Amino acid sequence: MKKLNETKIFSTRDLWLAATLSYLKFDIISIDYQIEGRANYPVGYFNFADNAALQEARNKFFRRELAIEPNEMRTILRTLKSETNNTYKSPHSNFA
């Protein structure tokens, strides 16, 4: 039985998908990170509340059916990269 405050989570490490969902006004619940690669850099895992609208937006992303304003997308990408780095440097910070 599902509890009332239990939320299904959709998590992605795809920065472009996360930025697109943010652009479409889906709120990021939290950012987790994992150290990857030879350079040991943080890779963000962006967590969203999973629902039918988010899944439809995700499907449209992969079907290339979305139009996004480029300058706003660039700003969102920079913000998400910065937030991932901030989470890595201060894992006790609260993003949401």
Image: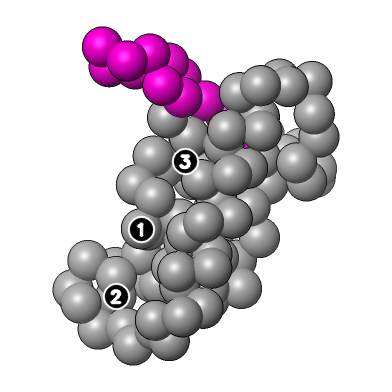
Residue type highlighted by circle 2:
Lys
Q: Closest to the observer: 28 or 34?
A: 34
What secondary structure is the magenta-colored segment mainly? strand
Q: Where is 69 relative to 34, above or below?
A: below
* Spatial separation of the CA atoms under disc 3 and disc 2: 17 Å
Q: Which mark is residue 37?
A: none
Residue 46: percent from left, percent from top: 52, 43
What element does badge 2 sit on? helix
Residue 36 drawn in magenta: yes
| Quadrant in the picture for the N terminus | top right
Q: Residue at x 38, y 72 (%)?
A: 56
Q: Where is 74 relative to 89, above or below?
A: below
Q: Which mark is residue 60?
A: 2
Taking the image as shown, residue 27 lies to the left or right of residue 60, namely right
What element does badge 1 sit on? helix
* Spatial separation of the CA atoms under disc 2 and disc 1: 13 Å
* In front: label 2 or label 1: 1
Highlighted magenta segment, given as a residue range: 31-42
Q: Which mark is residue 16?
A: 1
Q: Which mark is residue 11?
A: 3
Residue 57: percent from left, percent from top: 40, 72
Q: Earlier in the sequence, mark 1 or mark 3?
A: 3
Q: Residue at x 66, y 21 (%)?
A: 89
